[in-house]
Amino acid sequence: MSHERLLQSVVSVLIMAGYNVSERCGMRPRSFDLIARKGDNLLIIKIVPHIDSVGEESAHDLAVIARHLNAKPFIIGEKARDFELERGAVYLRYGIIATSVTTLYDFFVDEVPPLVYAQPGGLYVNINGGKLRDVRERHNMSLGDLAGSLGVSRRTISKYESGMSTTLDIAIKLEEIFDTAIVEAINLLSHSHVSDFEDDSHSESIKKDGSNIPQDFERMGMQTHTMQRAPFEALCIYEEKTILTGYGTAQKTLRRAALIGNISDITSSKAVCVLTDYKKRKKVGKTLIIGEEELSTLNEGSELIELIDE
């Protein structure tokens, strides 16, 4: 399936699930393709036929944007290495959840969560350790009895009952022995796997040198997070308000202004583009267009937010 068809399939799934979907991010390179919201659930989605093609810089941007917008990052694709992504399975790329569009449909439309996650060595599941202990004891089986039936050690059974995950094959055998479901479903919206970019220290080694982000933002008391492959150059934080920030020449930046505004609308954030060769102030959709010279006259982040909200 081509990237375009895959993207259309993802949009269709999200709309069927009742999500408000942003305009697609058509720039290249890009760290995400779509942003979608339904109530308090905000998704930032990267769509690629092959999930291994998502590089470190794109994954970093995806994780940082999601963290500061209180969103959930997803990678949707068809293949990993040389095989198709399994339906009902969760994969990880730099700690970010990756699934197939069919798994996305099952979870968001049919409300059927995945059960399996892929790791080096095969497919694994989370089992309910307390439930396993209860059914084992009700069947009058000792740790040794169950270990013998599965071909594992007593210590391994004890770890299962303490919450250790297991292979899909072992989980199937356990459910056959006790005729009871003990596998725990994976909630894609509350999955707590830690991404590889839990702080911004990584960004210092791969981000731009900062020359594309005006120092005025930091002077005005804003925390600035530089992006590599997003339609905006930075996320600026001021008193818990997030500002999606573009910066550059009018030719480069204005064509992104409407998209940045659309994204800010979906994410309930602010949007501004600072132009180095333009002095008039205006609005393009939700995005404030302001010249670098005027920006330098502002003293506090609150002044910029007031201009954005006018």
Image: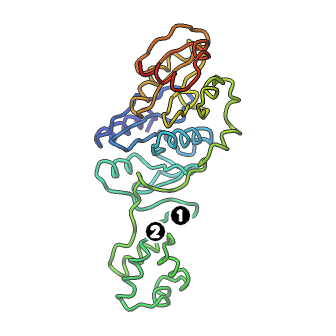
Question: What is the x, y in percent for residue 300?
Answer: 56, 25
Q: Nearer the viewer, residue 162 or 213?
A: 213
Q: Quadrant of the N terminus?
A: top left
Quadrant of residue 24 in the image? top left
Work out how far the residue at label 2 is from the one at label 1, CA to CA, in angstroms: 8 Å
**Residue drawn where x is 46% and y is 86% of the image:** 146
| Residue kind at label 2, given as amino acid type | Leu
- Residue 122 is tagged as 1
Question: What is the x, y in percent for residue 303?
Answer: 51, 22
| Colour theme | rainbow
- Residue 168 is tagged as 2
Quadrant of residue 187 in the image? bottom left
| Tag 2–tag 1 contact (CB < 8 Å) | yes
Quadrant of residue 38 in the image? top left
Q: Is residue 190 left or right of residue 158?
A: left
Q: Residues within 10 Å of mark 1 (few under 14, many from 20)?
A: few
Q: Nearer the viewer, residue 154 or 176?
A: 154
In this view, 79 is above or below 178: above
Question: What is the x, y in percent for residue 259?
Answer: 45, 24
Q: Residues within 10 Å of mark 2 (few under 14, many from 20)?
A: some
Q: Secondary structure at mark 2?
A: helix
Q: Specify which label sits upstream in the sequence, 2 or 1.
A: 1
Question: What is the x, y in percent for residue 8?
Answer: 37, 34
Q: Secondary structure at mark 1?
A: strand
Q: Quadrant of the C terminus?
A: top left
| Residue kind at label 1, given as amino acid type | Gly
